[in-house]
Amino acid sequence: MVKVVAAVICFTLGLPPTVSATTGTGLLLQRAAKLSGLTARRPVQTAKVSGTRYDSLVALARAREYPRSLQRLDARPYARLGLITRDVHSRLASGAQASRAWYDPAARRLLLRRTPSAGRVTVIHELVRALIDQHFGLRRLAGLRARDRDRAIAAQAIVDGTAALASGLRAQELRGTALDRFLELEYTAGLGPGRALAAELRYLGGRAALGSALRTFPQTTEQLLHVDKFLERERALAVRMSSQVGSATLLTAESFGELDARDLLQAFRISGAVAAAAGWGGGRLGLYDNGRGDDVAALALRWDTADDAAEWRDAFSAYLAAAFAGELARDCPPLDHCWSGASDLAFGTLGETTVFAAGPGAETIAAALLVQG
């Protein structure tokens, strides 16, 4: 998940009094400034806390930015996508426990886990984030996740990518379940795509070009993944998701970007994921109540061309086979295929639009969304 925190967290939890940067951190701040080219306008206040307190602070901060109610709501379409069979919150909490240093933009403070302590590279990475905050302001990220998920991921990724370009921090090898891999790809978007965009911008226009991305964040993960899309500021295509489909009612919907499409395939180790997602034009992931108390997830995507839509359809077929092994396909015009078995699934393509739905009543909802475009 993106590394953000709500205001006044330190006061509400009784964090130890702030101290000026220690000599060691001060030297690392100088190193971070040299590596990033961002001058330190003031010392970075630092607090060392116990591992238990550190985990609690970071987990609570993430919960404030990404409330548990929203986590539970997101867990329902994640389950329908074959990623999980239980609430996603425990996985989100475990991500917080993996870090050892974290710069808090709300309090403008660097938190350091006392034991085990963070390594030099990790601390420099967080200090670069602190320098970015001093120059460009990171409080703009607060609340963005709840308003536009794709935009929040893109914005946080360029911040983390700029820090990674300076610190040398890289993502670890993916492990665990499909959900573990999906969330890890989201958590570390800055260490891969974010770092790549930062490097391209610096190559093309030096630190001024990179600064433009920190001043005006990428608006979509498509802009994050393609420097030309970022420079052109290409916007996402609108995707409509009906509030009512027959007796089914839309409960929630959020943006589903190119990085999400790529990550979903990569979570199930589908080859060609990058190419299959590259023609993304716009997308939304919605959750419907089918009128009988059952959840139905709907993923509607618009592609740049019909060929891009067809390429996604082929890769998505491999994902379906991996995520829903044993389901029986049948024809169900105007959709491409429907599947019956342990899960009700439906997928359709119409021109540059693809729709996937999962859950009781998936066929009806997918057909309605496909026709409306």
Image: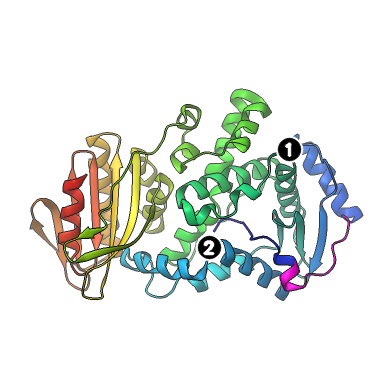
- In the rendered structure, the answer to whether residue 44 lies left or right of residue 104 reads right
Q: Residues within 10 Å of mark 1 (few under 14, many from 20)?
A: many
Magenta stretch secondary structure, dominant: loop
- In the rendered structure, the answer to whether residue 232 lies left or right of residue 354 reads right
Q: Residues within 10 Å of mark 2 (few under 14, many from 20)?
A: many
Give me the residue at 57% from left, 31% from top: 200
Residue 276: image location, x then y, percent: 33, 43
- In the rendered structure, the answer to whether residue 126 lies left or right of residue 182 reads right
Q: Magenta region: which residues?
A: 11-20
Instruction: Decide which of 369, 272 is in the foreground and name it.
Output: 369
State the SS at label 1: helix
Question: The disc labelled 2 sits on which kind of residue?
Answer: Tyr
Q: Is residue 17 magenta?
A: yes
How are the residues colored? rainbow
**Quadrant of the frame with the C terminus:** top left
Give me the residue at 28% from left, 47% from top: 240
| Residue 80 figure quarter | bottom left
Give me the residue at 21% from left, 73% from top: 342
Q: Which residue is mark 1?
A: 36
Q: Which residue is mark 2?
A: 66
Instruction: Decide which of 203, 229 is in the foreground and name it.
Output: 229
- Mark 2–mark 1 CB contact (< 8 Å): no
Residue 132: image location, x then y, percent: 70, 42
